[in-house]
Amino acid sequence: MPEPPFLPIYMGGKEAKQIDQDHMIVKDAYFTTCNFGHPHYRFNSRNLTITQRKTPVESYSEIVARHNTFRVGERPVAYLPKYTYDTRTKSSFFKGFGASSSNRLGLALTTTWDPLALGVFPELNRWMHTVVKLDYLSKRGPAEGTEIFYKRPNMDGYLETFYVKDHAETDQTTGLPVPHENRGRLLWRHRQHINKEWRADAELSYLSDRAFLREFYEPEFKTGKAQETDLYFRRLQDNEGLTFLAKKQIHSFDTGTEALPQLGYQLISQPLWEDRLNLSSQSSLGYLDFHIDDKMNTLDPARYQKLKRTTGSSIRMDTDNTLSWPFQLWIAQFRPFVGSRVTAYSKSTKDQGPNDGPAVGRLATSLGLDASTNFWRIYSTESKLFNINKLKHVITPDLRWEVGPTVTKNPDHLLQYEPSDGLSKYNALVFGIRNRFQTRRGPSSQLRTVDLLDLDLEVHLLTSPSDGPEGNTTHYVGNAEGSLIPKKHSFLQPDIRAQLTDRLALTSERSEFNLDDFRFDFYNVGITFQNSPKWYQFLGYRFIRDTSSTVMVNTNLLVKEKWSLSLGEVYDFKPRSFTGAAKDARSLATSIILGRRSHDFTGSLYLVFDAVNKNTSIGFNITPVGVQRSAGRTFSFAPTP
C-alpha cells in the first residue's frame, strides 16, 4: 500500500504558555488542515496540549485537545470530548462525498470517513488505515461499507465489508429476481511472515448471493482476482520450496477445484554432476474435489454435463521432473532437456460418469531444447524530426522446441483438476526474435539512453491431436515460458512498443495472427500523444475475431490551473450477441468528467452512458486534498479522476 503524504495542520489560539522545551498549552485554541486565514472548517478547543516526542527513527508533535467543537464556517456541527492528533497522521476524519443518479442505483448519496483520524486510538494510526462508507441508494436502500488496511513488520492485510438492504425486485445486470433484501460481502486477505523461511497466507471471501458481485462490484467481477477461501503455507530455503494448501468453495454457486488439503514440493535448478546438469522438480499430493454450481444444470446444461463427466473427488499425486544440460557454444546459450510427469488418481471416469472408475495412473514424457543469443550494432543515425541521436540495435533471438511423445492415458478418462490433467501428445516449436532500438535524448550535457522501439515477434507452431471421443478437444501444450496453454492453432504474436518522440508513443501487445486460417484472432493497438503538459490524448483499437471491432478514444485537458476535462468514448463497429448473432454498430460507453481543484478539496462532475449494462449515471465526488485514496472496489459508476 503506497504511503500517502503527511497532512499539514494549522492552529491558533488566544493564549499560549510554554511549559518546558517539549510541552506547550494553548487555551481557546483551534486547529485545522485548511490553509485559509479564515478556515472553512476547524476544531475549536477549550485547551490544547502540544508535546514534542522522539523515537529512534523520527520526531513528531502530538496534540491532545479537550472539549472540542467541530465547526463548518461558524456553525458547530459536532462535539468531541477528547481528540488526539500527531503530525505523522496521513488522513482526515472526512474523506469524501459524492452524489450520482443512475438507472441501476437511482439517486446515490455516498460519504466516506476515517474514524481513526479522530485520535481515539492513536497507536492504531501507525499501522492501520480505516475507511467507512455510509451511503443511500434510492432504488436499492441504505448501504454501508468498511475497508481496513493494516501493515506491521511481520504481517499485512486487507479487510472489506459491504452491506445493502436491497428493496429492488430485479438485478439490472442479470435480469434475475433479487434473492433476498439482505445482501453484502466479506473479504479478508492476510499475509503473515512467520520467519525468514515460512510465510502464511489466508483468504476468506463470502458473498450473499451469486449475482451480488456483478451487480455492485462489476469491475472486480470482470477483471479482479477470483473469490477464494483458502489457507496457504509456504517455506522457501535456497532453491527448495514446501507448500500446504487448504481450499474450499464455501458457496453453493461456486465452481472450481477444492484442496482438502494438498501438499507441494518444488526444487529449482538443483546442480548435478559437478554443475553439468540441472534438475527441476515439482510434486504435489492431496485430496481434491471439484465443486459445481448447484444451478448450472438449468443455467448452462451443456457445460454442466461436461463437468459432471470429468470431475469428482479423488486422491491425486503428481510429480513433474525435468533434467537439463545448459552449455554455451560460441555466442549462443543452449539448454537441451528431458522430462517426465507421473500422475496418479484414486478414482477415474468410466462410462462417461465420474468417480465410478478404478484407480488410474498416467505417464507423460517430454524432451526439447532452449536456445538464445544476443548481439548488437550502433548506427550513426541523426534525425531532428524523431529526436534521434545515434541508434543502437539490440537483437535477441530465442528458440524453444518441445515434444510430448508419450501420454499413456486419454485425458477424457481422467478427472480434471488442473491444466496438466488435460495434457495430450503435442509438438510445439516457438521461435522469437526481439529487436530493441535505442537512442539518446535530452540536453547535450545530460544525454540519456531511451528505448525508441521494441519489436518482438514470436511464432508458435503447435500440434495437439484431438483424439478424444468428442473429436474436437482442446489440449494444453507447453509455451516458451514453460507453462501450459490451451490452443488449437499455430499463431504469430507480434508486440510493438514505440516511443516515436517524447510526445508520441505507439503500443501493440497481445495480438495473435492465426497461421492456420491466416487471419488475426486478436489485435490490439494504441497511440498516445502528449500535445503539451496540459493536453493528453489516446486512440486505441481492439479486434476480437467473430466478437467485436472496437475503437477507444480518450482525451484529458487541463483547461485552466484548477480545471480539467476528460472525454472518453468506446464504439464497437461489429458487435455480436452471446449467441454469435451480428448486431448493429453502436456506442458501448461514453464518459465526460469535469474536475476542479481548490486549496483543500478536489471535485469531479461526471456523466457516463453505459450501453452494455443499459445504465446512465450522473454525479459528482468531493475529496479533501492530501487524503489517502481508498484502495478497495466501489459500486459507484464514477470514473476515477
Image (cartoon, rainbow, N blue to C red):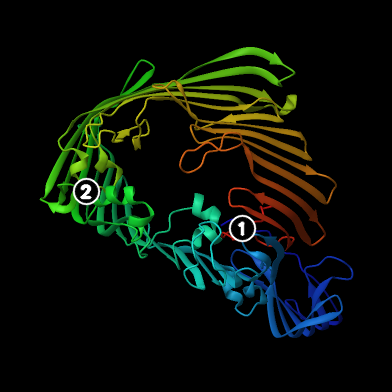
Name the residue that disc number 2 marks.
415
Of tags 1 and 2, which is closer to the observer?
Answer: 2
In the rendered image, the residue lying farthest to the left is 358
Q: Position of residue 569 (x, y in %)?
A: 68, 41
Q: Which residue is mark 1?
A: 3
Foreground residue, 464 or 182? 182
Which label was assigned to residue 488?
none
Q: Is residue 130 left or right of residue 547?
A: right
Q: Residue at x 68, y 78 (%)?
A: 84
Residue 84 seen in render? yes
Residue 577, image x, y percentages: 51, 42
> Which element is circle 1 on?
loop
Q: Image quadrant for the N terminus? A: bottom right
Sequence-first tag of 1 and 2: 1
Residue 336 appears in the figure: no
Q: Look at the picture and state if 26 lies above or below 342.
A: below
**Amino acid type assigned to the residue bearing label 2 in the image:** Leu
- The percent coordinates of residue 422 (x first, y second) are 26, 40
Q: Residue furthest top?
A: 380
From the viewer's side, name the closer residue of 603 and 310.
Answer: 310
Residue 575 position by quadrant: top right
